[in-house]
Amino acid sequence: MMTREQYIESLRKLNLNVYMFGEKVANPVDDPMISPSMNSVAETYAAAEMPEYEELMTVTSSLTGEKINRFTHLHQSTEDLINKVKMQRLLGQRTASCFQRCVGLDAANAIYSTAYEIDQARGTNYLENFTNYWKRIQTEDLTVDGAMTDPKGDRSLSPSAQPDPDVYLRVVERRDDGVVVRGAKMHQTGMINSHEVVVMPTISLRPEDKDYAICFGIPTDSEGILIVYGRQSCDTRKLEDDADIDLGNKHYGGHETLVIFDDVFVPNHLIFMDGEAEFAGMMVERFAGYHRQSYGGCKVGVGDVLIGAAALASEYNGVPKASHVKDKIIEMTHLNETLYACGIACSSQGTKLPAGNYMIDLLLANVCKQNVTRFPYEIARLAEDIAGGVMVTMPAASDLRHQKIGPYIEKYMKAAAPSAEARMRIMRLIENITLGTAAVGYRTESMHGAGSPQAQRIMISRQSDLPAKVKCAKRIAGIKE
Amino acid sequence: MMTREQYIESLRKLNLNVYMFGEKVANPVDDPMISPSMNSVAETYAAAEMPEYEELMTVTSSLTGEKINRFTHLHQSTEDLINKVKMQRLLGQRTASCFQRCVGLDAANAIYSTAYEIDQARGTNYLENFTNYWKRIQTEDLTVDGAMTDPKGDRSLSPSAQPDPDVYLRVVERRDDGVVVRGAKMHQTGMINSHEVVVMPTISLRPEDKDYAICFGIPTDSEGILIVYGRQSCDTRKLEDDADIDLGNKHYGGHETLVIFDDVFVPNHLIFMDGEAEFAGMMVERFAGYHRQSYGGCKVGVGDVLIGAAALASEYNGVPKASHVKDKIIEMTHLNETLYACGIACSSQGTKLPAGNYMIDLLLANVCKQNVTRFPYEIARLAEDIAGGVMVTMPAASDLRHQKIGPYIEKYMKAAAPSAEARMRIMRLIENITLGTAAVGYRTESMHGAGSPQAQRIMISRQSDLPAKVKCAKRIAGIKE
Amino acid sequence: MMTREQYIESLRKLNLNVYMFGEKVANPVDDPMISPSMNSVAETYAAAEMPEYEELMTVTSSLTGEKINRFTHLHQSTEDLINKVKMQRLLGQRTASCFQRCVGLDAANAIYSTAYEIDQARGTNYLENFTNYWKRIQTEDLTVDGAMTDPKGDRSLSPSAQPDPDVYLRVVERRDDGVVVRGAKMHQTGMINSHEVVVMPTISLRPEDKDYAICFGIPTDSEGILIVYGRQSCDTRKLEDDADIDLGNKHYGGHETLVIFDDVFVPNHLIFMDGEAEFAGMMVERFAGYHRQSYGGCKVGVGDVLIGAAALASEYNGVPKASHVKDKIIEMTHLNETLYACGIACSSQGTKLPAGNYMIDLLLANVCKQNVTRFPYEIARLAEDIAGGVMVTMPAASDLRHQKIGPYIEKYMKAAAPSAEARMRIMRLIENITLGTAAVGYRTESMHGAGSPQAQRIMISRQSDLPAKVKCAKRIAGIKE
Amino acid sequence: MMTREQYIESLRKLNLNVYMFGEKVANPVDDPMISPSMNSVAETYAAAEMPEYEELMTVTSSLTGEKINRFTHLHQSTEDLINKVKMQRLLGQRTASCFQRCVGLDAANAIYSTAYEIDQARGTNYLENFTNYWKRIQTEDLTVDGAMTDPKGDRSLSPSAQPDPDVYLRVVERRDDGVVVRGAKMHQTGMINSHEVVVMPTISLRPEDKDYAICFGIPTDSEGILIVYGRQSCDTRKLEDDADIDLGNKHYGGHETLVIFDDVFVPNHLIFMDGEAEFAGMMVERFAGYHRQSYGGCKVGVGDVLIGAAALASEYNGVPKASHVKDKIIEMTHLNETLYACGIACSSQGTKLPAGNYMIDLLLANVCKQNVTRFPYEIARLAEDIAGGVMVTMPAASDLRHQKIGPYIEKYMKAAAPSAEARMRIMRLIENITLGTAAVGYRTESMHGAGSPQAQRIMISRQSDLPAKVKCAKRIAGIKE
């Protein structure tokens, strides 16, 4: 397993093709816009080195028998599924951000199990390809981006019926040694901090879409891959002298990218699906299911930090004992723990897949994510309530250090805090999570990550076994017709 | 284990002292006001006889090694805790009512574990008393009422400081062979259908309240016990000729009673706590914890019936495919499954108590119950939305059979249903759960059972480890002061 | 204007054809099942006699120049519209029920204005018919039922395409002196307490449905009208000896009926629309609009009683100063006043119709009603929270008077109330509004009266002028395409 | 009245003492960080010049009889109060921001009426002072900041008991010709765009706090006033080359400041209260009341833009007809119009104050603001739902223009929009209002402006006349005790 430092060094060796603000980025690892997100991923390595977290962060590989980072594990039990959620909550608490590494983990479990079932049905050899690939990921302790969402173009048309056939990623050329793919994947979280990327289809496919039924894994710096860094609220505060205070969370962050596959070659041994359109839906549903479980962990961890920050803010504001403040903290906790309960429940009710790894309960995982599209917003609202207006009307940290006006700010901004700076720091952290860089992760990604709310509603509808409920009702009501 | 029939026969042997509507009830078993609630309890016996539910409904006793009904089990694992919730959901689906038998189960697990800890601390012999008592319960497969809530009088005063010392149940006399108790227990669910009642204190107690620190189990027809049947919405529809249709749920129901202990003698061997005031809080907290878990099962089962009924109502109304109707069914399902997730999660995260039986996770169980004080109300509101106004404007079933007006009602009330009667039946079932007899269980008891919402909020606050969250926030914000 | 007593006497002269529980009702006025609802209507007469309410309850007729009850007024200003809402709130406070008389008022304003516009477009004479009719209503101070909702049959088909053409009320025969109609009207609130009924179409109609485009007013005891009384939760408590206590609201109530028009003759001078299908939508929209405004008054008044009851319950329970109780009372008040604000706003923004009477603002009236489908449910939930479980577990009043058990009930049920009876009375009132007879009005009718929630959403969508908002957004975003 | 251009020129003549990011700002008018907020205020002048808005934006002064901008008007009727709300909604639609000028308007109406009542009670001459002052404001058409919120220090102590007496603004010296004040005012919206500032106390005061009972108006560039600019989310995007696209709303914005009064001299004729502590509460309550009304206008206007933006985003995403999208737009509209209804209702129910100007209904204004602390958050959440994840993962505008990657972005980001740029613009506008600079106004100020939620709850409690409601409940329940 890699240490935190080894991980960072390993990234330096990548020759990524990254664009940001209209320019090519020479050195992503040291770029102040990108590095906080790298620190979040690095925390998944650092925590694995800490004795107190060893049991949660590491596990014995089902593929190699070696001790691996849990972020690369194929789940072997419901306990593994539960531990995944607990690990994610821990990382959320430690980064107050999106730590990005879950996507590859969720992709691996989805691809592994689907590859097995394709092989069973079609006599293909995808499981071996994937197993060999993933053994290397586990052994080298790599970070893997999971790429699913295509640009989609005209949403009323299937992939092969699009005016521009590239708006869904597809095979454009077949060679003896592999395939060439073209297209793009949107919302790629953590791509720049990843060694590898595994690409999956984004929707259920029909036979005529078989060129779109392609799944593979390749290095992130493969020829033809272009990465465009996405803007986030308050992103450039990272570049400011006073980022330490004004950013709210100096060390950790997340990032999102648009990844363009401009005729990228994929060798045969890295292909895990190619043309089996009828299995695309299974892979998507499993990936989405695992990823909807994930939110019952990571967002809860960020919620913990926000609750802690709100409690501290109330203390610094001088009103920690007001009954309405205490009640709001309780409500935040209640909502946050409800999310956690959903994450735990869908794990606890997981079942073994034919391939041998464990799948979460689909209905409960979708219920989990659906709540995640709501409660973090209410938790954030309550945090803004407790913080007070000062969160958005405060001067910059540089004003606090100004010879003339600094003393006034210290005098008038301190309230019940040990210092005006302490109060500014906690306010900026709340701002960071509710409006700033981390709000992208805590709010918008809670909404859209792993599928938009409507996607979960469709799955809830499908999984709810309504006929069985109607039967119960008829029995009670005495309806025999 | 008793069969359903044996259970009913066994109740006939009880000589209960029941009052209802200002009169003594000669034969509770055959009383049409009471018997639907008896049928609900009887279903816990009937289901245990059914092969398809055997695994869920029965379990091997940790006390006797015999196969017992799970409603009498001391939980030996988190799997047992999860199975309890699943069993409760099943019974909720089969009765659409409160089936009453959980209270004794939850009391048993709380008393058993507390008795053990009292014995450890005080050298008493309560565990043996309780174990002997409970072995008999398991072997004879009895139904046990768990009695906790006292009338409370002036809520600003402790029990011993009340103007009327009886408003909390207490020991009024000590004899060599036992004690005499006086007081009352409110909200006694299922008392008339129970063979035994176990009595517990209702709050944490201080040394001066030690006469109130009394826990015991006795037959429900013990000398001095008076039971007063509580009224429920629409209760007298049970007496009507057309109860089959107009009641909405002819077979099943619940009941609530006020139980008066008018100087009741309790022999020494049935006493499980007497005077150990400092352990009262532990017993209350554990009972409440188990019972808050329970609601993540039983109310979910009733919710299943209500969702099924709403879906059928939409079909009978002729609008099952309207997108807003489908969306409301999804929302009902989402909320219902969120409750279930909380019930499962607090079970999955349970831990072994010193006595050896398993305790649910207290924080998550309180979160579970807190959601139960909200979501069934919203599910009921959505059901009323889907049902339509006809639910509360329909004629009586007797009008449907009337020679002159019956044909008009058939003509104008049928809509898309197979018959006007079928439509009336499903509407009356929804009425039953949202406004009628079962609304007492599905709404008000969801609110107040196992403690009112504020009781859960206090527990959530206590269990939330706010300082750890503040520490996380300080670390992220860089606050060292 | 009639006094309360004259009103009741006037009802005795009606020869209504009422069925209830499978039997014909000989004397509706004195029937204990019906009379509480009559008392609610009677309160609209009684309040008009009281000097303190004279200004609100009476107004000068625009048709006759005489002083009339505002419940028969054609609104002449936005002040009139606002006063209507205030009058409704007052009556809600005085009856804690549906007082039924608004429907006719809302129908009159819709028919008057539509009749005018039909005449203008078609050269018909409906305005004169209606004006003559309504002058008599005003002068004789009659109560008028407004009948709109048809059974509807298969909702995917238009009226004339139904397998059974009678599921929408229609003209089945035309004579020189009038027409004969057949069909039924559902959910007829207060029909039995009304002297007259005005019938309107229930949806927008197309030319082929012109036999369904019929509007008229006739006496409620006209030949061929059959009225079937609808059941309500807890209805038969009205028949019990202890109705005074156990019913919760002995004096006031509402009722709903199914009204069958079995080939009823309507003379020409009482017809206000006949065949002008293209005006059906206008009439429906206006009636619904006025009636959606109404709910911003009447339900607020009932809410006032429920808030007062909850406050008193908290006092009787001994916890009026608990911060969470006070906060819940505030929340109930906040929600209730939000409804009132919507009722006032849609009135304040009313506009003059071509006929001269005033119309409410349609968008805001629909917003008002949409909130009414939500907030009373939450207010009721909070009331149940404050009341406590005792609301649904209490013995009957007859137990309180029982020689043996009565003293126990007094002892254990009194809590901080002046007497157990006082506590039972306030609990039963809360039960009445949240689960009992008045729950039909406060909950289900809040949901479905004046159109189900989805009906309001469609109107909100139509009235929201989305293109203007898109234009604002484009201007701000600098989008010129 | 000033034109938009004259207003901007007039600001250039001010010699303001502004600090931002640790430096003194030489020229606030042309500073790109400040000027968008100036444009918002300027729009209050521009709109008054537009014939289509003349009736709404201008009015005849009650003081001078001249035509004035309504932003300087003393309300003379409920129609004036309603027109104020409509004017605010218009400006919200035109700026999608806080346009800042309401504070002075609300302060003027509060001070005018309070000054009158102080004079009546104390024989002082404040009304004349204020009238003279305000005639000049009206005639010269000035923008006035209203300053209320003090830093407050230890919230458990009254102003005069604070360790640092300056944490509430106070008189530190009295001279023959005036007074000297010291302290600070927080959250000063629009200070830098204002010609004058009127200062009021922030809470009810007791006799010992009379040095804090000070109210006056002075130029914003008075000697001793220091203004420190507050940071906002995404503020520095205003400095970027691509602000036109990436900022989301290039032209308009708001700003907040901390204003320090470092021994500022106030001449006698500009003092409107000095020492009449018992009137501080009246002034605060009235200002807060007017300002809580204001939010029922301005935030609704911003909401209109956000609804329009979401609708356009759904079109550009290619899913404008999905039923769930349409339903979310309806919900946003419903919530937004509920806020408007509250703004209208509290205006419609306004009453004449002793001074002759009109006051809003206090209960309904507090209900209005309480809803504003909730619904904009839900509207924002729904907008984020409709926008999709692309809102926070999109590249910068500079990437779109990049020679190499620009074409890829055009290809993959366009979806159903006329161009990728158009889609980016609408997404950035939604980001601006939900996460960016305008989120400060639309979210946090909706929460805390005019008092935090708890402040409204206290007022709702005070204004709700609970005893009258209890009386209603007792009458219905038949409780005579």
Image (tube, coloured by chain):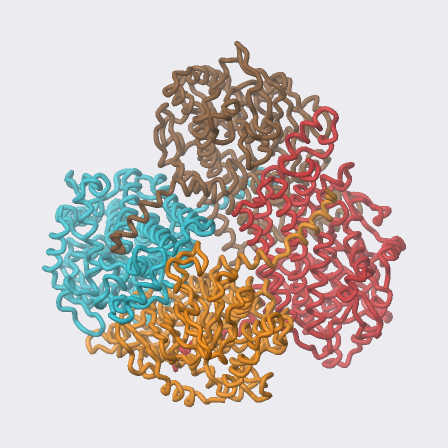
Chain colours: A cyan, B brown, C red, D orange
The residue that appears at 32% across and 49% down in the rendered structure is B470
Is B12 placed above or below D449 here? above
Q: Name the residue nearer the viewer: A158 or C339.
A: C339
Instruction: Using the rendered view, name the quadrant where residue D122 is placed.
Output: bottom right
Asked if residue B324 shows in the view, the reply is: yes
Instruction: Using the rendered view, name the quadrant where residue D348 is placed.
Output: bottom right
Asked if residue A206 shows in the view, the reply is: no
Instruction: Using the rendered view, name the quadrant where residue C172 is placed.
Output: bottom right
Left or right, residue B18 beside residue A380: right
Residue D319, x across and y down, in percent: 42, 67
Is A22 placed above or below C7 here? below
The residue that appears at 62% across and 67% down in the rendered structure is C365
Q: Name the residue nearer the viewer: C31 or B173.
A: B173
Q: Name the residue nearer the viewer: D464 or A174.
A: D464
Residue C480, x across and y down, in percent: 39, 82
Residue D295, x across and y down, in percent: 50, 69
Is D464 placed above or below D137 here? above
Q: Name the residue nearer the viewer: C212 or B132.
A: B132
Residue A265, x across and y down, in percent: 16, 62
